[in-house]
Amino acid sequence: MTFGLLPTLVSVALVASVEPIEIYVATDGNDAWSGALPAPNTSGDDGPLATLTAARDAVRKIRADKPHSPTTVWVRGGRYALADTFILTAEDSGSAGAPVTYAAYHDETPVLSGGVELTDWQVTELNGRTVWRAQAPDGGRGMRQLFIDGERQPRARLPKTGWYQLEGLPDVTDETEWNQGQTRFTYAEGDLEAWDDAQDGEIIALHFWTDSHLPIVSVDESTRVVELSKRSVFRLTTDHGKEGAFYSVENVAAALTEPGEWLSRDSDGAVYYLPKPGEVIDSFVATVPRLTQLVRFDGEPETARFVEHVVLRGLTFSHCEWWFGPEYEPTWPNDDIGGMVQAAFAVPGAIRLRGARSCRIEQCAVMGVGTYAVELERGCQDNAVVHNTLTDLGAGGVKVGETTIRENGGEQTHRNQITDNVIAAGGRLFHSAVGIWVGHSGGNVLAHNDIHDFYYTAISVGWSWGYGRSLSAHNRIEFNHIHTIGQGWLSDMGAIYTLGVSPGMTIRNNHIHDIVSRRYGGWGIYPDEGTSHAVIENNVVYRTNRCGFHLHYGKDNLVSNNIFAYTGEAQICRTREDPFSFRGNIVYWEDGSLLGGRWDSLNVTIDGNLYWNAAGSPITPAGHTWDEWQKLGMDETSIIADPLFVDPANDDFRLQDDSPAWMLGFRPIDLGNVGPRKAELTP
């Protein structure tokens, strides 16, 4: 009996004897000190460390003797200029009962910056204007971001608002495929000039669902032809038609006209800034990014060496930049391409996790970066990105998974939580980036996020076109508030966009509104290219400029108990005639038709719905009268009636007690729990 109790007694004694480890980092610290004190001592010979790297190394040494001790690195407030990317490997792991945490000290705000400050500003003249000039790091080459007193400043641009539209494509014929890019275009009279510094300029073109960034070689005013050093990722048209792409030109001196604008020049390696009224040349902080990434969790999933049980809490991350270079190998592997096929997926995360298990990024802020904020890449499983603010992003918010299917289960990315985050103001450099992107990855929870102010899609899940193999299964997309998406910039987009066979995927209880595309697109919920076996229920979708729901093609999807309201073109659309079920929904509109797309084949289950055209127009599904439609076996128990929303004109889509929808069995949709929940404060 005594020997049977011994392991338990030893375990209890071990837990009781474990003391937490605490290390401190501060801007007035010293890497030669112990890090055991939160502030320098009175004798000035001991105190906090100065860098995260020194703290990481100290933790390694201490935990070698105390592996069961929970460990916290407390980071005091202030700005920390990172000399290099902060890297954690498998040897920096904690354990389930003893995690390693890098946390903001109490109520202080530490900022980890990958930028450098520009100093020694001089007053000079540029293009007839008085500007300030400073030497840029690395000669200013490729520089695309400048922050003044922490705020992103606009790079000089023409036109000042809106976009130009190219007039012609001299190298395009009727045989040119839509996915063939160009290196030349013809501009409209008066838009561009053969500026002396044209070769410093860059064309940013919006076409299809992507953006191309094309350095100028020359501008010929006699032919109005622009030569470009990179090829656009697709044809330079707005969509599959012949209408010319919309574009702007950046980084030429003629565009430097408004206070707060800036540009850089390769010829002299300098940054030029047009100051705002009241700014003083020697009393502001100008920061430019120097690092590509700020933090990396470098596990090795191919050899089962994982970074485990590491937490980042309460930290702020700013200032990094990535651009097309030799390492850029997306679907188009050539360095002469100036864009990405979709979703800016090749742009890395400012915080990148590879081979991470049971790690957390919580209550942090990522802002003022030129990349995605967070990336859970190869072999990331059971991690959480929760209660963060991700804003002012060059690309998107969070990337999960890869575009490659890994055969080894340990190298696959699954079961991650992206919840309760504010993800906003994205696509500032790469306009086709998305709020949350999930590639070949399953079992993830994307919930309770507020995603807004993007130019393409809010949530994109899946990376298989058609009915081929996909790892994107059992993903849950729920209780998200998604709004102000698209904003008329790009086409073929939606609030929630999915790809490929997706067994077990649920899209439910999302609040979606104000989705606007450039041309086609502008859909609320958009199952694309083979999306199959999805359940789409209890969503409220309104003010989309095309359709509330659009199925390109896919099989066995169920759309049930949703509200679709105030869409512009049609309410429910499908491109191909694949079967799906549309049951128990409320559809409410004033403009446009009920159905859009192809409905020659009625191989669908549509029933138990409530329809109401608030403008009083007759409802004619697919060109049929209502009686004809029902005789075809469609909507046999559906009704046409006012659903009696509380106040639809002011976005209150709750149902009144006497709504006829209750008789159809409609279940109430409570939007009170949508969006980020209150974070539980962690000591």
Image (tube, helix red, strand yellow):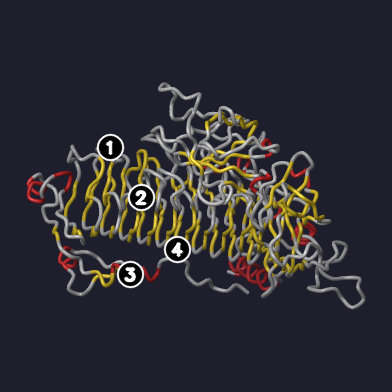
- Residue type (three-letter) at the residue carrying disc 1: Arg
Q: CA distance from mark 3 to mark 1?
A: 35 Å
| Callout 3: SS | helix
For the residue labelled by badge 2, is the local secondary structure a helix, a strand or a loop? strand
The circle on residue 523 is 2
Quadrant, the N terminus? bottom right
Depth check, front residue: 75 or 72:
75
Whether the residues at callouts 4 and 2 have beta carbons within 8 Å, the answer is no
Badge number at residue 510: none
x and y percent of residue 32 in the render?
A: 88, 62
Q: Amino acid at mark 4?
A: His
For the residues bearing labels 2 and 3, Cβ distance under 8 angstroms = no
Mark 4 or 1: the one toward you: 1
Q: Nearer the viewer, mark 2 or mark 1?
A: 2
- The Cα atoms of the two marked residues, 4 and 2, are separated by 21 Å
Around disc 4, counting alpha carbons within 10 Å, would you say few (fewer than 14), some (14 to 19), or many (20 or more)? many
Does the image show residue 352? no
